[in-house]
Amino acid sequence: MKNQANSPVKNIVLVHGAFADGSGYKGVYENLIRLGYNVSVVQNPLTSLKDDVAATHLVLDAQDGPTILAGHSWGGAVITQAGNHPNVAGLVYIAAFQPDNNETALQWFLTAPPAAENGVLPADEKGIVYYDKAKYHAGFCGDLTAEEAGFMYASQGAFYGECFVTPITAAAWRNKPTYGVVATEDKSINPDIQRTMYKRSDTKVTEIKGSHAVYISQPEKVAAVIATAANEISAM
């Protein structure tokens, strides 16, 4: 199968998840730029699945050809829905949720007991879900420094719980080549949950030793997975 534009995939769009923002992709961005890719980073409002998909589509609209759409964590649900955009040639899931039609991210989150380090709190009176500050470092980004974890905690967006419980209506991985990274030391999304989702979708999987924030702690390896997806899809 040749990619839809019949040309090499040179565009990458990166989608962040909950309890973080787009700045975490700096290392992945730098590695991909050095490889010659055009890289864009979406800043999700994290207010609803619909809003995050709309923000992603705005960036995809600006691409000049076939694009790899990559998402971390909650961003996996976003790219599952947004990946139907005609510019998307393939998907990369980075320690990410990968729901099917009529499934939610929360459904998958609940399929295995949470790690003791996991600090995802119940929604507050405004419907916003936060990560316990006392658990953020160990539970979200245990292989980063305390200083890095502190900045990430301080700069995270407000994540509305509505996102977690909104079902996917058109899973793009059913129609697009799909790649995935399992973060083997993940304390936020159990690695076995990642493996189960990816196995069901016949995702091409790379396991990387790293925390849930593997895209920050191991940017070279995550960028290599994205570049491999672009190269292999270009050859289809």
Image (spheres, grey):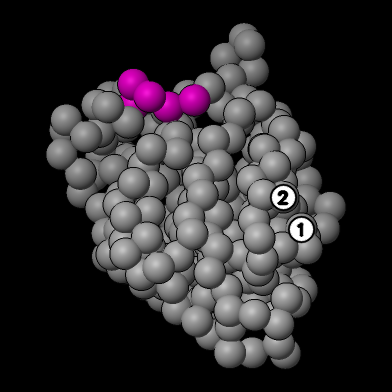
Q: Which residue is drawn at 53% across and 69% down?
A: 10
Q: Tell which circle, 2 or 1, labels the residue nearer the N-terminal end.
A: 2
Which of the 4 image quadrants contains residue 221?
bottom left
* Viewer-closest of 68 and 135: 68
Disc 2 + disc 1, Cβ < 8 Å: yes
Which of the 4 image quadrants contains residue 58?
top right
Q: Does the magenta stretch include residue 209?
A: no
* Viewer-closest of 2 and 194: 2
Q: In this view, does 151 lie to the left or right of 192?
A: left
The segment highlighted magenta reads 153-157
Identify the residue under disc 1.
Answer: 85
Q: Can residue 156 be seen in this view?
A: yes
Q: Chief secondary structure of the magenta span? A: helix
Q: Which residue is drawn at 58% across and 79% down?
A: 8
Q: Where is residue 184 in the image (x, y as percent from the top left)?
A: 33, 64
The circle drawn on residue 29 is none
The crowding category of the residue bearing disc 1, from other C-alpha atoms within 10 Å (few below 14, some 14 to 19, many at least 20), is some
Identify the residue under disc 2.
Answer: 61
Q: In this view, does 94 lie above or below 235?
A: above
Q: Position of residue 84 (x, y in %)?
A: 77, 60
Q: Residue at x 55, y 63 (%)?
A: 11
Instruction: Name the residue furthest front.
Output: 64
Between disc 2 and disc 1, the foreground one is 2
